[in-house]
C-alpha cells in the first residue's frame, strides 16, 4: 500500500510541482498525440514571421507516412530563424538541416502550424547502423523525469532500427483505433 | 616610468574588469574567433529605457485551456509576480513594469518584453529569450548588444499546469530570466532546467540568479561589495570552452561562470566568504537540441557559433577529485582571487548528471527534496542519468550525514536511489549540496535538498470576517504550519496579514480586491521555501470573491502627442483604487512614471509618451491587485508636436536629485519645445496654483522654488510660456525624511558591545515615518550596506515614533554598516549598525 501511495504521489508531483519547460513524452505518447508521423528528407529551408516570432520552415519530401493525411510534402515549423536581417534563436529549438533525412512526429494545432512534438523530442535522425541497416536515433536526455505514470522515461540515447520503430508506432496506432 | 607602466597595467585590468559582463553566462558575442576573449553580452540598454524600466506586455489569447477554478486574470497575476521576482533584486538596476495587453506583431520604438500565448505542441510548455537586437553599443567601458525585444512564449493549454502551481510559476520566472538575457545555469537556480532546479515559489531566485541579473545590470557599487574568482580550465595545454565553474559555499550558496574559448573564466558577484570551487562539463545535449545544456554558445561577428570543445571529468580546486582534499578559496569584496586553475581529463560523458531529488512530506512528492530536521522522514529519493545505489554520496559541508548503507535502491522502484540523512544539532536551515561519486567521476548537485525545521504550511479554509475600520473586507484563513513569516497569496497577489495566531493556525488578512466572483487559489508560503502546495498539490484552497460592479474610467486628457511627459487624471465610477494601483497603457511606447491614488475614484499619473511612438488608439488597463479594469480605446497617441512647450520630467530636488520634494526647496525640471528658447522672465510657474519663483532658466533647465504653503502629497506643476500653457506635470511634495533612533534586539540596544547577528529580528525605532495611521510593511525597506531588507512589521510607538522590525540577512558581513530606512522615496540619513 505504501508503495502505491508513493508512486501516486510522484505522479502528482509531476503534474503539480514540475517546472519543466519541456514535458517529457514517451514514444507511445508521441505516437498518440502526433497529428502526422512522417519519414522524409528536408528539401528546402525558408523563414516566416508570425507575430513577433520568426520561424524556420522546413519543407520535407515525405518518403514514408505512418500517420496523417496523404500529402507527399509537409512543412515543419520551428521557432527561431532569420528574417529581414533579424536572427532569432530560441533556447531548445532543434536544428533541422537541408538535405538530411529525419523521422518527424508532428503536431498541428488550431494555429495550423505543423511543429515537432515536444520541441525536439519528436525529431529523430535517420542513420545507417554498422550493418548498413537504417535506424532512427535520438541522443541521451539531459532532462529525464518521470512520466505521468511515475515510470522513468528513457535515460539514455534512443536508437531503434527503422523496422522496430515502424512496428512500434503501428502497434500504438492500432491499439488506439481499437 | 615604472609607475606609468603600473598605471597602464592597472588601467588595462580595470578596463577588462568593467568592459564586459563576466561571471554567470549570458547570450555572448565575441569580436573575433581568436583571443583575447572579452565576452560581450546581450542586454537591455538602461539608457534607452524610461526610468531603467523595461515594460512587459501580455497578449490576450482568444481562448485559453484552463482548469475549472483557474482564469486568465489569475495567470496574469502570476506572470506579474514572476516579473516581480526579478524586479525586486536590489543589486540590479533594471526594473520591470507591467505594460498592459497587446496584439502580437505590434512594433514599438522602445525595448519590450512580450509574453505571448501560442499553440505550442504537446511536450513544449514555454520558451523565451531575446528576439530582436540592435547593433553593438558602447557605454563607457562597457560594450553590449542591446536587446530591443524579448519574447516569452507560453502555451495556450494550462489544463495540466494551473496558474497557481509551483511548476507554472517557476517556468514563467525562468523564461523571463531568458528574456532579460540570462542563459541556463548548472547551480540548481531558477535558471537551471527543471530537472535540477531547486528554487520554489517562496524563494524563486537563488544566489546565482541574483548574481546573474546583477552582473548584467549592476547597481553602482555592486561589484565593489562582491568579489571574484578567476582562472583557466585546461585540457593539456589547450583551453576548455564552455566549462562550468562553480563557487560553492557549504551553507547553500552556489554561483557559477562558464569559460571562454581559451578556457579563461571569472566568477563574479560572490559575497565575501570561503568557497569550494569546481569545474565540470555541461551535460550532453538533448537530441534535436544543438548544444550541451541547451546553452546557446557565443557567436563571432558573423553570427557563427563558437561551440564547446570537450567533455571532461569534474574536478575540485586544487586539482583533486575528492571533496576531502579540496581547498577553499577566500573571497574578499572588490578583489579577484586569481589563478584558480584546473587541469582536466577528457571523458566522453559524465558518469552521473541531471539528478532530481524528491521528498514526501505528505502525499505529494516535493521537488527539490525538503527534509524537516525536527522530525519526519529523513530520506530523499533521487533519480539521475548514471545514478544508482552503488554511488558514493555525501553532503558537502557536514550539516547532514549519510550513514554507512544510507544509499540504497528505492524499494518501490530500484531505478531510483534512496538516501538516508542524519542531522546534527548544528544542522541549520537551508539548501545543502550533494557530491555523488561514481565510475571515477564526481557529480555535484548544488542545493540537492533543503533542510527545514517545520512542517509545510497548509490552508484548509478561507471565510469572510468583519471588515476593518476603513471598510476593507477581511478574511479568516485557517490551516496549519503557519509561522510569523508565513505569507498568504491569493493567486499572485499577497494579502496583508492583519493578525495571526500561528499556534491556533489562523490568520486574519485584508482581502485583496478582485473582479466579480473571481476565484483565487489561496497558497501559504513560508520563508524556509515551503509552500502549502507541498501538502495540497493540485488541490489548494480557493476563495470566491463577491460580486462587484465592473466600474469604468475616463482619462483626462484622453490623448497626448508623441514626445509628451504630462499629467493624466483618471476619474473612475464604481472603482475602488488603492495604493499600489497599477496603470498600464498597453504599449511599450508609453511609460507610466508614477501613479498617485487620491481616492477610490481618482488617480493622477505622470505619463511619458516616447518620441518615436506610433499614433493610434490604446487600450489602457488599471489593476487593483486581482481586479482588472480595462478601458478599451480610452487613450490615444497623436503625432508629435515639437513646438509644443512641455516639461520633460521628473521634477527633482535640484540639490539631491531625489523626486521627493520638500516645501521651500529648489526643484528642477527640463523644458523643451518653444519655451526652451525663452528667458526666465517669459515663464510663469505655479504649483497647485500657487506661484513658484523661477530661480533660473538656462539650457532648457528650469529651476524654481517650491512654494512654502503646500501640503504633503502630489502637487500639479504648471507653466505658461509666452501665454501658452504647457501640459501640467505632477510633482511629489513630501514629508521630511524619517529619522532613525535606536536599533534593538529583544529590547537590548545594538552597538559595538552587542552587535547584531545574521538571522536576528532587529527593531529600528524611527521618528517622522509619516502621518498615516498604519503602514504596510511592504512599503518599507531597511538598507544595511548594499543589502535591502523588507520590513516584517511596523508598530506605532510613543510620541509619534514607530518600531520597524526586520530580519538581518546573512549576506551582510561582519563589521560596521550604514543602515537607513526607506519609505516610498523618503530615505533616512544613515546610522551605523554593528554586525558580528
Image (cartoon, rainbow, N blue to C red):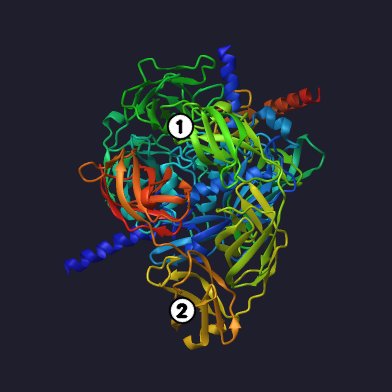
Give the farthest residue toward the front.
B799
Quarter holding the N terminus of chain B is: bottom left
**B102 up-or-down from A127: above or below:** below
Question: Percent x, y for residue B375?
Answer: 42, 20
Q: Is residue B262 visible?
A: no
Question: Residue B432's image quarter?
Answer: top left
According to the picture, the residue beneath numbered tag 1 turns out to be: B483
Question: Percent x, y for residue B708?
Answer: 44, 73
Which of the numbered marks, if any, corresponds to residue B410?
A: none
Question: Percent x, y for residue B493?
Answer: 57, 44
Tally the numbered discs.
2
**Upstream in sequence: badge 1 or badge 2:** 1
Image position of B8 (left or right of B439) = left
Which of the numbered marks, if any, corresponds to residue B701?
A: 2
Quarter holding the C terminus of chain B is: top left
Q: Secondary structure at mark 1?
A: loop
Residue pictured at 41% horizontal, 43% vertical: B207
Q: Nearer the viewer, residue A79 or A103?
A: A79
Q: Nearer the viewer, residue A87 or B715?
A: B715
Spatial CA span between label 1 and label 2:
53 Å
Q: Secondary structure at mark 2?
A: strand
**B292 up-or-down from A172: above or below:** below
Amino acid at each position: 500500500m505504501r508503495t502505491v501511495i508513493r508512486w501516486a504521489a510522484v505522479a502528482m508531483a509531476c503534474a503539480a510541482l514540475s517546472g519543466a519547460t519541456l514535458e517529457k513524452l514517451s514514444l507511445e505518447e508521441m505516437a498518440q498525440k502526433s497529428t502526422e508521423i512522417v519519414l522524409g528528407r528536408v528539401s528546402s529551408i525558408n523563414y516566416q514571421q508570425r507575430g513577433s516570432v520568426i520561424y524556420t520552415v522546413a519543407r520535407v519530401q515525405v518518403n514514408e507516412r505512418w500517420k496523417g493525411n496523404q500529402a507527399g510534402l509537409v512543412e515543419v515549423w520551428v521557432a527561431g530563424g532569420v528574417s529581414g536581417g533579424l536572427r532569432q534563436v530560441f533556447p531548445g529549438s532543434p536544428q533541422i538541416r537541408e538535405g538530411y533525412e529525419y523521422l518527424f512526429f508532428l503536431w498541428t494545432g488550431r494555429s495550423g502550424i505543423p511543429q515537432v512534438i515536444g520541441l525536439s523530442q519528436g525529431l529523430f535522425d535517420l542513420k545507417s547502423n554498422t550493418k548498413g541497416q537504417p535506424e532512427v536515433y535520438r541522443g541521451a536526455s539531459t532532462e529525464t523525469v518521470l512520466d505521468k505514470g511515475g515510470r522513468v522515461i528513457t535515460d539514455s540515447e534512443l536508437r531503434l532500427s527503422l523496422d522496430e520503430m515502424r512496428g512500434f508506432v503501428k502497434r500504438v496506432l492500432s491499439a488506439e483505433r481499437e | 616610468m615604472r609607475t606609468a607602466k603600473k598605471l597602464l597595467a592597472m588601467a588595462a585590468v580595470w578596463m577588462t574588469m568593467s568592459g564586459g559582463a563576466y561571471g554567470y553566462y549570458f547570450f555572448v558575442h565575441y569580436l573575433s574567433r581568436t583571443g583575447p576573449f572579452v565576452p560581450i553580452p546581450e542586454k537591455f540598454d538602461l539608457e534607452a529605457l524610461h526610468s531603467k524600466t523595461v515594460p512587459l506586455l501580455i497578449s490576450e489569447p482568444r481562448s485559453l485551456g484552463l482548469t475549472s477554478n483557474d482564469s486568465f486574470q489569475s495567470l496574469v497575476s502570476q506572470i506579474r509576480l514572476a516579473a516581480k521576482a526579478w524586479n525586486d533584486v536590489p543589486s540590479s538596476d533594471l526594473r520591470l513594469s507591467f505594460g498592459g495587453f497587446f496584439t502580437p506583431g505590434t512594433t514599438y520604438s522602445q525595448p519590450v518584453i512580450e509574453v505571448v500565448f501560442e499553440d505550442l505542441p504537446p511536450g513544449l510548455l514555454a520558451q523565451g529569450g531575446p528576439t530582436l537586437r540592435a547593433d553593438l553599443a558602447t557605454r563607457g567601458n562597457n560594450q553590449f548588444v542591446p536587446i530591443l525585444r524579448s519574447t516569452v512564449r507560453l502555451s495556450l493549454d494550462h489544463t495540466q499546469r494551473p496558474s497557481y502551481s509551483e511548476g507554472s510559476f517557476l517556468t514563467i520566472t525562468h523564461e523571463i530570466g531568458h528574456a532579460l538575457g540570462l542563459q541556463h545555469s548548472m547551480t540548481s537556480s531558477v535558471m537551471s532546467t527543471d530537472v535540477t532546479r531547486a528554487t520554489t515559489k517562496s524563494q524563486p531566485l537563488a544566489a546565482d540568479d541574483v548574481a546573474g541579473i546583477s552582473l548584467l545590470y549592476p547597481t553602482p557599487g555592486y561589484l565593489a561589495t562582491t568579489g571574484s574568482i578567476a582562472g583557466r580550465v585546461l585540457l593539456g595545454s589547450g583551453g576548455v570552452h564552455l566549462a562550468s565553474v562553480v563557487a560553492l559555499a557549504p551553507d547553500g550558496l552556489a554561483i557559477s561562470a562558464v569559460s571562454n574559448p581559451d578556457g579563461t573564466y571569472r566568477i563574479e558577484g560572490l559575497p565575501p566568504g570561503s568557497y569550494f570551487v569546481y569545474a565540470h562539463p555541461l551535460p550532453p545535449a538533448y537530441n534535436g537540441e544543438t548544444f550541451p545544456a541547451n546553452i546557446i554558445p557565443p557567436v563571432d561577428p558573423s553570427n557563427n557559433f563558437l561551440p564547446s570543445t570537450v567533455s571532461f571529468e569534474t574536478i575540485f580546486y586544487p586539482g583533486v577529485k575528492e571533496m576531502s582534499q579540496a581547498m577553499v578559496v577566500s573571497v574578499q569584496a572588490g578583489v579577484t582571487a586569481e589563478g584558480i586553475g584546473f587541469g582536466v581529463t577528457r571523458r566522453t560523458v559524465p558518469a552521473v548528471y541531471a539528478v532530481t531529488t524528491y521528498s514526501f512530506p505528505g502525499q505529494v512528492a516535493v521537488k527539490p527534496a525538503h527534509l524537516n530536521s525536527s522530525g519526519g522522514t529523513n530520506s530523499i529519493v533521487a533519480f539521475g542519468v548514471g545514478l544508482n545505489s552503488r554511488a558514493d554520496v555525501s553532503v558537502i559541508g557536514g550539516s547532514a550525514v549519510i550513514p554507512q548503507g544510507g544509499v540504497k535502491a528505492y524499494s518501490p522502484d530500484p531505478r531510483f536511489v534512496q538516501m538516508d540523512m542524519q542531522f546534527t544539532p548544528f544542522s541549520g536551515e537551508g539548501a545543502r549540496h550533494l557530491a555523488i561519486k561514481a565510475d571515477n567521476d564526481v557529480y555535484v548537485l548544488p542545493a540537492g535538498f533543503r533542510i527545514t525545521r517545520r512542517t509545510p504550511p497548509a490552508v484548509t479554509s478561507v471565510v469572510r470576517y468583519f471588515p476593518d475600520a476603513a471598510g476593507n473586507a477581511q478574511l479568516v484563513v485557517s490551516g496549519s504550519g503557519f509561522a510569523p513569516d508565513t505569507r498568504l497569496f491569493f493567486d499572485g497577489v499577497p494579502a496583508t496579514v492583519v493578525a495571526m495566531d500561528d499556534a491556533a493556525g489562523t490568520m486574519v488578512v485584508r482581502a485583496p480586491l478582485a473582479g466579480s466572483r473571481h476565484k483565487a487559489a489561496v497558497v501559504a508560503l513560508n520563508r524556509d521555501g515551503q509552500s502549502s502546495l507541498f501538502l495540497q498539490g493540485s488541490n489548494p484552497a480557493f476563495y470566491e470573491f463577491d460580486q462587484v460592479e465592473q466600474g469604468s474610467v475616463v482619462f483626462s486628457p484622453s490623448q497626448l502627442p508623441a514626445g509628451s511627459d504630462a499629467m493624466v487624471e483618471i476619474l473612475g465610477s464604481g472603482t475602488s483604487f488603492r495604493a499600489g494601483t497599477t496603470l498600464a497603457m498597453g504599449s511599450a511606447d508609453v511609460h507610466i512614471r508614477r501613479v498617485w491614488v487620491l481616492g477610490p475614484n481618482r488617480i493622477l499619473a505622470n505619463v511619458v509618451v516616447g518620441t518615436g511612438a506610433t499614433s493610434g488608439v490604446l487600450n489602457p488597463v488599471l489593476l487593483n491587485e486581482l481586479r482588472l479594469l480595462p478601458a478599451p480605446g480610452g487613450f490615444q497617441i497623436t503625432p508629435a508636436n515639437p513646438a509644443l512647450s512641455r516639461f520633460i520630467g521628473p521634477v527633482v530636488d535640484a540639490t539631491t536629485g531625489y523626486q521627493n520634494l520638500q516645501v521651500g526647496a529648489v526643484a528642477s525640471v527640463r523644458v523643451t519645445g518653444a519655451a526652451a528658447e525663452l528667458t526666465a522672465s517669459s515663464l510663469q510657474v505655479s504649483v497647485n496654483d500657487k506661484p513658484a519663483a523661477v530661480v533660473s532658466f538656462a539650457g532648457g533647465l528650469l529651476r524654481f522654488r517650491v512654494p512654502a504653503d503646500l501640503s504633503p502629497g502630489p502637487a500639479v506643476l504648471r507653466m505658461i510660456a509666452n501665454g501658452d500653457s504647457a501640459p501640467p506635470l505632477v510633482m511629489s511634495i513630501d514629508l521630511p525624511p524619517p529619522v532613525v533612533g535606536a536599533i534593538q534586539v529583544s529590547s537590548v540596544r545594538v552597538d559595538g558591545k552587542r552587535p547584531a547577528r545574521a538571522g536576528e529580528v532587529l527593531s529600528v525605532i524611527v521618528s517622522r515615518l509619516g502621518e498615516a495611521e498604519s503602514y504596510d510593511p511592504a512599503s518599507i525597506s531597511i538598507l544595511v550596506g548594499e543589502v535591502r531588507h523588507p520590513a516584517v512589521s511596523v508598530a506605532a510607538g510613543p510620541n509619534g515614533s514607530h518600531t520597524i522590525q526586520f530580519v538581518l540577512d546573512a549576506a551582510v558581513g561582519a563589521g560596521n554598516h550604514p543602515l537607513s530606512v526607506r519609505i516610498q522615496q523618503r530615505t533616512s540619513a544613515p546610522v551605523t549598525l554593528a554586525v558580528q
